[in-house]
């Protein structure tokens, strides 16, 4: 899936499925960081955290990744706000 397709899917899901959109935002942050676009990487990293904050992330089951891979990004088995912050620590989110 290309960045543009992933962004379109993210924009479609962010209001109706914030949990899945949070993972997509994380993947987009990773992809933009890899491209050297720190502005967009930071934007999507913050969006991922914001969306995860809206979701119930209390148990290990809540944190299991929905996707194994988005674009070229392998998703961590467990994902939540702190995982996003840790993996994108270069962006100082």
Image (spheres, grey):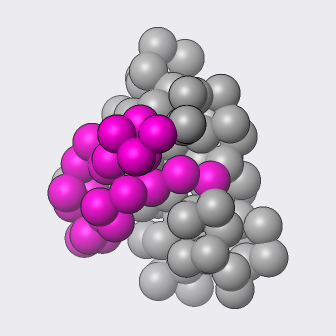
The residue that appears at 48% across and 71% down in the rendered structure is: 30
Compare residues 23 and 37 and report the one nearer the observer: 23
Q: Residue 81: where, in percent of width, then height?
A: 62, 53
Q: Quadrant of the C terminus?
A: bottom right
The residue that appears at 34% across and 39% down in the rendered structure is: 61
Q: Is residue 78 left or right of residue 84?
A: left
The residue that appears at 58% across and 63% down in the rendered structure is: 84
Q: Quadrant of the N terminus?
A: bottom left
The residue that appears at 66% across and 68% down in the rendered structure is: 85
Q: Is residue 56 left or right of residue 10?
A: right
In magenta segment, residue 75? yes
In magenta segment, residue 85? no
Compare residues 23 and 86 and report the one nearer the observer: 86
Compare residues 65 and 35 and report the one nearer the observer: 65
Tell which residue pokes out farthest to the front in this image. 59
Tell which residue pokes out farthest to the top in this image. 16
Q: Residue 17: where, in percent of width, then height?
A: 44, 21
Above or below residue 85? Residue 66 is: above
Above or below residue 74? Residue 3 is: above
Q: Residue 66: where, in percent of width, then height?
A: 27, 42
Q: Is residue 4 visible?
A: no
Tell which residue pokes out farthest to the right in this image. 92
Q: Is residue 66 visible?
A: yes
Which residues fall within the magenta stretch? 59-81
Q: Residue 80: where, in percent of width, then height?
A: 53, 51
**Total numbered badges shown on the rendered structure:** 0
Q: Which of the 4 image quarters holds residue 91?
A: bottom right
Q: Is residue 81 left or right of residue 60?
A: right
């Amino acid at each position: 899936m290309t960045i543009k397709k992933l962004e379109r899917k993210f924009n479609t899901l962010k209001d109706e499925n914030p949990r899945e959109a949070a993972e997509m935002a994380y993947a987009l942050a990773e992809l933009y960081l890899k491209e050297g676009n720190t502005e967009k990487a930071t934007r999507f990293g913050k969006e991922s955290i914001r969306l995860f904050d809206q979701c119930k992330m209390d148990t290990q089951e809540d944190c299991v990744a929905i996707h194994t891979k988005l674009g070229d990004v392998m998703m961590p088995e467990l994902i939540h706000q702190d995982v996003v912050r840790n993996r994108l620590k270069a962006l100082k989110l």
